[in-house]
Image: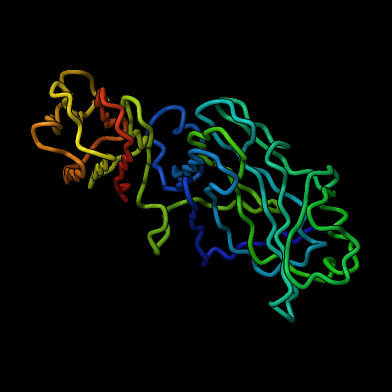
Amino acid sequence: MDVTRVFDPNEEVTLASGNNGDASWVRGVISPLDQKSPTGWLACLYGGTQTGDDWARVDIPITEVPVPYFGKGQWTYNLTGAQSMGVSIVFWIHDPTDPSKRADVSQVGGKVACAAGWNKHVFDKTVTQMFFYGENTTGTGLTAGTQYTWAQFQADALFSAWTVYRVTLEYGWEASGTFDNAWVADVKLNDQTILLKPDSMGTGQLMFRRFTGAAAIAATLAPKTPFFDLVVGLHLSAVPTTATQNLTINVNAGMGSAYDRNILTLATVTNAVVDLLVRSEGKFAGDDEIDVAWANTDTKTYGLTMSCRTVY
C-alpha cells in the first residue's frame, strides 16, 4: 500500500544549490521547454564544474509518510547534452519521535537516463540503486554507502519505522567533468502531481553562471526565460599588457541580429582593468543571450560571474 497524498498543497517546492551548482526557476517559453510541466514552470538545475560536491536540487517537503508506504515516483527532465548522471531522487527519512536520528537515502545518479534532450525516470523500488548515510542509525541491518533496493529500506528493522520528511531531485555530485543545464518539468510522487512554480521565499529567482581559466573568454548566459537585472563581474590576476584586447558584453537577441546590441566595449589595458562590475537593469526576452568575449592574449587567470533575475 502507498499513501497517495504525500505533499501538502499549502507547502511550497523550493530550490537549492551548492558550490559550482546553481538552481533557478524558468518559465517554459522556449521550445522544447514549453512542451512539458502542468504549470508551465521548470526547475533549471546546473551542475557546473564537478569536483565531487557541486550540486543543484529541487526540495519537496513531505507529510511524514511512513517509509513502507512511499514507493512510487516519476519525473521528466531535459538535458542540454549527454551526461554521466541524470536527475535522481533522494529520500530524507528520520525517526518521527527523535529527530536526532535521520538519514538520506540516495539513488545512484548513473542509474537514471542521462541522454541529451528529454528524459524520464519511473522509480522502481526493486532495483539495487539506493545507498544511505545518516546519524544515529544503530539498529539497521543495512550498511552505509552500500547499494540496496528501496524495498530493503522499507523492510529494514530500523528504517521501516521511520518517516519520509523530504524528497529531493538532485543533479551533480560527480567527481569530474562539467554538468550543463537540466530542466526538471514533471514530478509525481505516489501518484500525486507535484506542481513546480516559483515559491514565495524567492529561492531560484537568481541565476548564476561562473567561469574561470587562463585562456580566451567566450562565455554565454542563456536563461531560456524572461530576465532582468543583468550583472557581469570580472576579476583578473593582473592588469593585462597587450593593448589590442577589448572586452565586450553583447546581447545576442532571440528576435534576430537586427536587435543585437552592445552593452560594453572596454579597453582592458588603457583602463588598467583588474576588477570590473557591469550592471544592466533592462528587461530581456526569454530567448535573449548574453555573450562575454575577451582575447586574454596575456593568459591572465580570470574569474567571471554572470547573473540575472528571472521575471515572475
Question: Residue 212 versus residue 99: which sits nearer the camera?
Answer: 212
Residue 193 image point, x, y percent? 60, 51
Which residue is outermost to the left? 270
Residue 97 image point, x, y percent? 74, 81
Question: Residue 271 versus residue 63: which sits nearer the camera?
Answer: 271
Could you tell me which residue is drawn at 48 percent across and 39 percent down?
Answer: 48
Instruction: Specify whether 61 is left or right of 310.
Output: right
Could you tell me which residue is drawn at 49 percent across and 32 percent down?
Answer: 35
User: Where is 233 relative to 61, above or below?
Assistant: above
Residue 301: image quadrant is top left
Question: Residue 242 versus residue 254: which sits nearer the camera?
Answer: 242
User: Where is 281 relative to 219, above or below?
Assistant: below
Residue 78 image point, x, y percent? 54, 33
Residue 239: image quadrant is top left
> In which quadrant of the rendered image does the N terminus lie?
bottom right
Instruction: Specify whether 181 is left or right of 134.
Output: left
